[in-house]
Image (cartoon, rainbow, N blue to C red):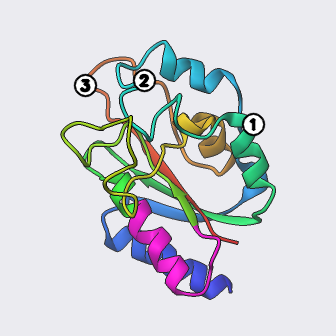
Amino acid sequence: MEKSFQSFCKFAKKMGAISAKVISVDTVVTAPWVRLKCQYGCDAYGEYLTCPPYSPTPEKTREVLKHYRKAILVHGDGYTDISKIVAKLERKAFLSGYHKAYGMGAGPCDLCNTCNVNKLCKKPYEARPSMEASGIDVFKTARNNKFKIEVLKSPDCKGNYFGLVLIL
């Protein structure tokens, strides 16, 4: 099993991730304040089916996490399409026999020019909510798993983006 998880990490890196790590789901932190940062701080709030108020609540995410033990935490920068990597990694894990595989990307969805929030998603095989939109404290989760992540202090700073694929 651990060997297949390592192959998932290699796959993520081949897809463009800076790094990927097998983590214990116990290290994933959820908090209700995270969605407030989406609502009061992001202009995508309510604009996409993958964002609040449509994405899973922190309470729902916490409940879902109870059904998993292991995940892959994927790390990228501003040039990495974390959400695309997560969707492909989720599919690879599913096809490898991990039927519960479920991914969460980073930031608002950009698959369609305009999201029709009054209908079903046009790209359900690719669109995933971000970790933040689902109430995950990305900073604490990344730090719990020995990733360096800091608040950006200027637009010139290099960003860090994370995605998560729950597997087992």
Q: Residue at x 35, y 19 (%)?
A: 43
Q: Quadrant of the C terminus?
A: bottom right
In the rendered image, the vertical position of residue 75 relative to residue 99, given as above or below? above
Rendering quarter of residue 109:
top left
Q: Residue at x 61, y 40 (%)?
A: 56
Q: Amino acid at mark 1?
A: Glu
Q: Quadrant of the N terminus?
A: bottom right
Q: Give the number of marks.
A: 3
Mark earlier in primary sequence (1, 3)? 1
Residue at the limit of the structure toward the front, as seen here = 119
Badges 1 and 3: C-beta atoms under 8 Å apart?
Answer: no
Q: How far apart are the two marked residues, 2 and 1, measured between alpha carbons? A: 18 Å
Which residues are the magenta region? 86-101
Q: Position of residue 91 (x, y in %)?
A: 46, 74
Q: How far apart are the two marked residues, 1 and 3, measured between alpha carbons? A: 35 Å
Q: Residue at x 59, y 39 (%)?
A: 134
Q: Nearer the viewer, mark 2 or mark 3?
A: 2
Please rate how many residues cluster around mark 1, counting C-alpha atoms within 10 Å: few if below 14, some from 14 to 19, many from 20. some
Q: Secondary structure at mark 1?
A: helix
Q: Which residue is mark 1?
A: 59
Mark earlier in primary sequence (2, 1)? 2
Please rate how many residues cluster around mark 3, counting C-alpha atoms within 10 Å: few if below 14, some from 14 to 19, many from 20. few
| Label ID, residue 156 | 3
Rendering quarter of residue 139:
top right
Q: Amino acid at mark 3?
A: Asp
Q: Position of residue 113 (x, y in %)?
A: 18, 40
Q: Amino acid at mark 2?
A: Tyr
Q: How far apart are the two marked residues, 2 and 3, measured between alpha carbons? A: 25 Å
